[in-house]
Image (cartoon, helix red, strand yellow):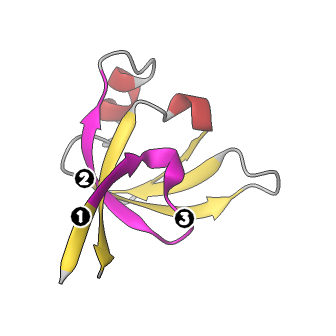
Amino acid sequence: MKQTEQKPLHALALNESGVVSEIAPECRLRSRLRSLGLCEGVRVTAVLRSPFGDPVAYEADGVLLALRKRDCEGITVQTEGGL
């Protein structure tokens, strides 16, 4: 049985995917991210991590976005984990 988990976008491990469940109103890049296709209901995957861990490249709806941890703290994703 699979169980869902809510976590911040920056907590995704490499090659882990989740569906965006919320972009907080106080997220400073909210409108910019939405215009690039990162919005609620979109599946996002962490695909590359820089050598020092920040920024991380995420793939969302065919778009590759490099985001720093501070820029994606207001983004919550829902992941599936196995039991």
Circle 2 residue: 42
Residue that protrudes farthest toward the front in the picture:
83
Q: Amino acid at mark 3?
A: Ala
72 horizontally vs 56: left or right:
left
Residue in view at x 45 percent, y 17 percent:
28
Range of the magenta residues?
A: 5-24
Tell me which label, 2 or 1, sits earlier in the chain.
1
Locate residue 50 relative to residue 29 in the image: left or right.
right
Mark in the foreground, 2 or 1:
1
Give the residue drawn at x 50%, y 72%: 15
What residue does disc 1 label?
4
Indicate the position of residue 80 as horizontal and vertical percent values.
Answer: 28, 70
**Residue 38 drawn above or below residue 46:** above
Single out the mark in the foreground, 3 or 1: 1
* In the image, residue 20 above or below residue 17: above
**Residue nearest the viewer, comparing 32 with 69:** 69
> Helix, strand, or loop for circle 3?
loop
Quadrant containing the N terminus is bottom left
Which amino acid does the dot numbered 2 rest on? Val
**Which residue type does callout 1 highlight?**
Thr
